[in-house]
Amino acid sequence: QVLLVESGGGSVQPGGSLRLSCTASGLTFDASAMAWFRQAPGKEREGVSGISWSRIYYADSVKGRFTISRDNAKNTLYLQMNSLRPEGTAMYYCAASPKGWVHFPISADDYNYWGQGTQVTVSS
């Protein structure tokens, strides 16, 4: 069975940094499109960043501050988050699509598998 496990969340002050990790198993990681979504209480889940073998996507709200990457040898997806803002407070979810590619901007409907989430809190 496909399993995605996020880690790296925590509490930081505005302007701080965190690196999220997502380790995947049970799927062909190299061929999968991967993404990070987030959801704050009372708000809809939104796409933060996505990466396939050929393209990278960032939401306008995080461009220039977040960097998505993947290490296929380790079946791991990363999200480096710099210059964090209070608006970044949310549960962050790793997602995977076996299709290998998705349309940008990313949509949660395109992703079949999801991790349990890791909490990111940005506050002073």
Image: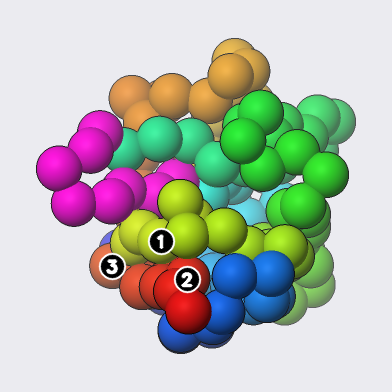
> In the shown orientation, is residue 41 left or right of residue 61?
left
Q: Is residue 98 above or below residue 117?
A: above
Q: Is residue 16 above or below residue 36?
A: below
Q: Does the magenta run of residues contain 42?
A: yes
Instruction: State the count of labels.
Output: 3
Q: Identify the amino acid type marked 2.
A: Val
Res 4 → quadrant: bottom left
Viewer-proximal residue among 117 and 64: 64
The region drawn magenta spans: 37-44
Residue at which label 2 appears: 122
Q: Is residue 103 above or below residue 85?
A: above
Q: How is the image coloured?
A: rainbow
Residue 103 lies, in percent from the top left, at 59, 15
* Label 3 environment density (alpha carbons within 10 Å; few <14, some 14–19, many ≥20): some
The local secondary structure at tag 3 comes to loop
- Residue at image location 58% in from the left, 19% down from the top: 105
Single out the mark in the foreground, 3 or 2: 2
Residue 59 lies, in percent from the top left, at 62, 32
Residue at which label 1 appears: 89
Disc with the residue nearer the chain's start (3 vs 2): 3
* Label 2 environment density (alpha carbons within 10 Å; few <14, some 14–19, many ≥20): some
Work out whether residue 27 can be spotted: no
Disc with the residue nearer the chain's start (1 vs 3): 1
On residue 116, the disc is 3
Residue 96 lies, in percent from the top left, at 48, 46
- Residue at image location 63% in from the left, 56% down from the top: 29
Q: Identify the amino acid type marked 3.
A: Gln
Single out the mark in the foreground, 1 or 3: 1
